[in-house]
Image (cartoon, rainbow, N blue to C red):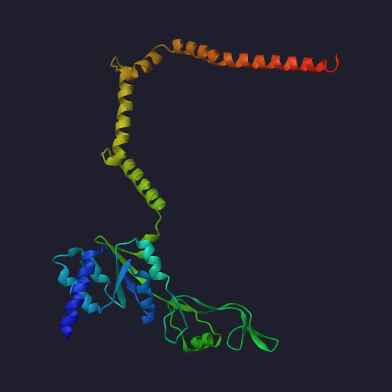
Amino acid sequence: MGRSDTKANYFDRLRGLLENHSKIFICTVDNVSSQQMHEIRRALRGEATVLMGKNTMVRRAIKGFLADLPDYERLLPHVKGNVGFIFTNGDLKEVREKILENKVAAPARAGAIAPIDVFVPAGNTGALGVPTKIARGTIEITADLKLVEKSSKVGASEATLLNMLNISPFSYGMGIQQIYEDGQTFSPDVLDIEESQLLKAMTSAITTIATISLAANYPTLPSVMHSVVNSYKKAISVAIETDYSWEAIDELKDRIANPEAYAAAAPAAAAATDAPAAAAEEKKEESEKEESEDEGFGGLFD
C-alpha cells in the first residue's frame, strides 16, 4: 500500500468517525507511552474510539470535509501541539473519567516542565543543600521543602536530588484540552458544573430580565406574568373606585362597602368554632373530678 493510499484510508476513517459520533475529546498526549495508549484504548473499547495522526494531515482532512460538515471547522483552532482525538456517543463525564484515570508515575528529568509543585518531605536523606541536621549517623531534612515550582523547568541538581531520594513526583497520562459536542467546543471544566448551579444561574438571570423589563415597560417572556398580575391589580383598584364590577370582585366590594356586617359575622364564627372546644374541655374537667372523688374513698368498703 502506497503513501497516498494510506492517507486516503486515514481520511476515510476520520470522516466516518466524524459522521458517526456527536462528541469528541481533543486530548494532549505529552509523555504518554505507547503502553499507556494501549491501556487507554482497551479501557474505552465499546464506548469510544481513539484516533491519532499528524496535525497537518488532520487539518487538511477536516478542511476537505467542511463543505459537507461545516460544524467541524470549530475543531481547527485546537489541532495544535501533541494532541489526539477520542470519539464517542456516550456520557461525557464517564468517558472523561476513563481517559484521565490512566496515570503512570514518572521521575523528574532535567529540562522537563513541572506539571505540579514538587516538595521534598521532611525525613532522612544523604543529600545536602537543604535545611538538615545529623540524626543517628544520617542526614535528616528538618522541614518540607518546595524544590520545583509548577510550570518551571526541572534543573539538573533538582532531578539528581529527587532521583537520589527515590521520589517520582510526576504522573503522566492523557489530558483533555477541549471537548466538541453538537457543533460547539468548550473547556472540560464545564463538565464539573452541577445542575443545581445552572438552575441557580438561570433563575437569577430570569429575575434580572424580569426586573429590567418591568422598569423599562418593555414586555419579555419572564416579565409577562408580572405584567398581567400588576394589570389585574390596577383593574381591581379602578373597579373599587367606580361602579364597574364583575363577579370575581363582587364580594370584595361588598366587604369594603359594609365592613360592619362582616365584622359582626367574624365573632359569631369564632364563637361557633370555640363552643365545641369549650364543651370538650368542660367534659374533661368533670371526668377528672369524678376520678379524683373515687380515689378519695379508696379502700373504704374493702
What residue sits 40% from the left and 75% below the top? 173
* In the image, residue 17 above or below residue 276: below
What residue sits 67% from the left and 17% below the top? 284
Q: Does residue 236 appear anywhere in the picture?
A: yes
In the picture, measured across the screen, residue 161 lies left or right of residue 11, that is right
In the picture, measured across the screen, residue 246 lies left or right of residue 94, that is left
In the picture, measured across the screen, residue 261 lies left or right of residue 139, that is left
In the picture, measured across the screen, residue 192 lies left or right of residue 128, that is left
* Image quadrant where one finds the N terminus: bottom left
Residue 244: x %, y % from top left: 28, 16
What residue sits 23% from the left and 66% below the top? 74
* Image quadrant where one finds the C terminus: top right
What residue sits 21% from the left and 65% below the top? 19
| Residue closer to the observer: 248 or 274 | 274
Residue 71: x %, y % from top left: 20, 63
Give the farthest residue toward the left. Answer: 67
Q: Does residue 189 appear anywhere in the picture?
A: no
Residue 153: x %, y % from top left: 43, 82
Q: Tell me which corner region of the image, top left, top right, bottom left or bottom right, holds residue 142.
A: bottom right
Residue 2: x %, y % from top left: 16, 85
* In the image, residue 65 above or below residue 105: above
